[in-house]
Amino acid sequence: MRRLLAVTLLAVMLSTTMLVAGNGAGLSPLFSHGAGGRALGMGGANVALANDASSVFWNPATLTSLPDRSLSLLYLPLPEGTKYSAAAFGWPTVDYGSFAVAAFLLTTDQIQRRDNLGRLLGDFSANQQMYLLGYGKNISRHLALGATIKLFGESFDNTSAFGAGGDLGIKLTISEYLSFGFNAQNLLAPKLRLNRASETLSRNLKGGIGVVVPFTTGRNHFAVEVDVDKTEKADPKIHVGAEVAFLHSYFLRGGYDVDQINFGAGLHLGFATFGYTYRTQDFFQPQHQVTLDLSLGGSTSSILAKREAEKLKSSEEFARQQREQELAATLVSARSFYDSGALDSAQVYYQMAEALTNGTNPEVSERLAEIKRKQSDELTATVRAGVLAESDSIKAVELFLELNEAISLKDIEAATLLIDQLRPAFGNDNRFRDGETSFKALVTDRCDQLDREAARLVRENNLADAAVRYAEILKYDPANTAARRNLKAVSDQVGTLTLLRSGIEAYQTGDTATAREILEQLLTANPNDSAALGLLQLLKQQAPTSALAELQKNEAIWKVYLDGIAKFREGEYEAAIKLWEQVLAEYPRNAETEKNIQQAKLRLKKNDTTN
């Protein structure tokens, strides 16, 4: 009889809260009790700072804070054979937002059935269920929206009822320290009909503000949140919670949850986080709640790194094909002009081909040397023949007229040839000096124009055409050190793309040793190449790794590892990378450390792009 009375008291409390709006819950009190070790320890104040799979219950918009796939589990035994359990699974994606499913179950078994005279007729069971399907997506840098579809059910003895409803959530991120959250629970209210009684679950509005403050050089943090629940026809209810985290692995929590006091603790080990909450309650003994949260991998940051590597591979292949097409067309023109005796035009196209091949094509090098010899021989023969003899004034007048016309038409090639022809005999002539001054101004203007075009082409990632422009500047002004330096830089970038393509091809053919050697060679020249970093990370993940537990056995190395995590939290990514590289020197191929370094390098690149 004592057990029957206790179960009856518990059932009355639960059903009163579920069906009477005046209670202020809007759901079964244990369902509004929620799930997730962090939320429970903070007294249910979680609408703004939720960051695990249980976010689907507290605020579906906070599903966007999931760092990777995660599973949240809760099992809670209650008095007189009543059991409360919950499970939630969250899956974030890069392109389509974050998804989650959850199930909540409250059951009481072996409830005694008696007749009016108190005679035992057997027993029966009662349960309540709630199933959630949630989605959240970032609309902008500061705004996220989410929605939850729910199915609520109740059964008592041989009678059952189900009703469907929905929630709508909003999260506003002011900064990395301050967030606001709002969740309209039962915005579409489930309606239940049990026997002849029909009840609609009350709408409940949750609003909250959360603050996270790092301290002690970022190795620890303090979080506090204040939430308000407002149910139809009921007074607002306050939830206040706080959390102190040490070394990102040890947690102390406390909260005020509608006239009840909660105390909690958490421990993070590897991919698992264990939570414990002590909760006071009226009429019954205090509750001891134990939760388990599991990280199941699939972080969005690693997916982005892999995509970037694939994108760069495609871009490099396109650039290679474009460069080959440009080279083929350039060589056709160069050979045509050379065969027809137009050496000046042939020289221009061969110089373009030299820039496209980075000086590695034997035919191009030989033809350029041959054209230079022929031009020198022609000039020497002209001077020796006396064509430009000082006494030949008529010929001189014709040549000066041609020079002025070439300058007016901005024909630098023709003007260059005439300047070279006139200089031996008329170098001190005022007409020559005037023409040479105009010629130098024309060359300067042309070089400036080519430099601007080259800079634009570099910004557009059209490196082949940029190299042609810089090569043309050096043709007119061989002493231009800036153009020579820029030509080398562009050529190096083209070489980098070629080297990266070789690494990717080796990786695809299964030659991981060659791929690793090529990628490390590329990173020596360009340590911030994100594509090479991402691909090298994939290779390292395939290699044997040391466990994180091995690091913890070495106190000195474990301290260095944690210091790196602290620097990462503070945004000092370069310092974090240096610390983690010290760890890898002692424990090569440690997967967690290599993954941390990859994340830090991606953050550095993102900051550079933003700045």
Image (tube, rainbow, N blue to C red):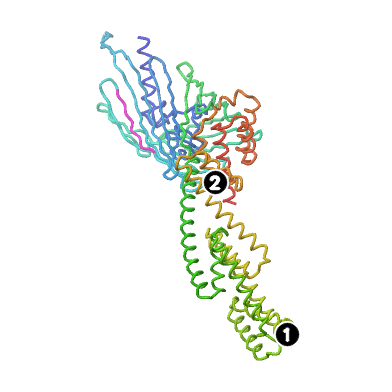
Task: Please indicate whether residue 219 sits to the left or right of residue 22 in the image.
Answer: right
Task: Find residue 72 and report its horizontal and vertical position in percent.
Answer: 44, 28
Task: Find residue 112 and report its horizontal and vertical position in percent.
Answer: 31, 13
Task: Find residue 605 and report its horizontal and vertical position in percent.
Answer: 57, 47
Residue 508 vertical placement versus 552 (above, below): below
Specify start and end residues of the magenta stretch as a single range: 148-155
Of circles 2 and 1, which is in front? 1
The tag earlier along the polypeptide, 2 or 1, is: 1
Give the SS element for disc 1. Answer: helix
Q: Are marks 2 and 1 in contact (CB under 8 Å)?
A: no
Q: Nearer the viewer, residue 293 or 480?
A: 480
Q: From the image, which quarter does the N terminus lie in?
A: top left
Task: Find residue 329 and report its horizontal and vertical position in percent.
Answer: 47, 66
User: Does the magenta portion include 445?
Assistant: no
Q: How many marks?
A: 2
Residue 419 vertical placement versus 508 (above, below): below
Residue type at mark 1 is Asn
Q: Nearer the viewer, residue 7 or 414?
A: 414
Q: Which mark is residue 411?
A: none
- Inter-mark Cα distance, 2 to 1: 59 Å
Identify the residue position indicated by label 1 in the image.
430
Q: Nearer the viewer, residue 293 or 544?
A: 544
Identify the residue position indicated by label 2 in the image.
530
Residue at screen point 51% across, 42% down: 535
> In the figure, residue 593 lies in which quadrant?
top right
Give the SS element for disc 2. Answer: helix
Residue type at mark 2 is Ser
> In the figure, residue 598 lies in which quadrant?
top right
Residue 78 vertical placement versus 541 (above, below): above
Q: Nearer the viewer, residue 434 or 418?
A: 418
In terms of secondary structure, what is the magenta stretch mainly? strand
Bin the neighbour count of mark 1 within 10 Å (Cα to Cα): few under 14, some 14-19, many 20 and up. Answer: few
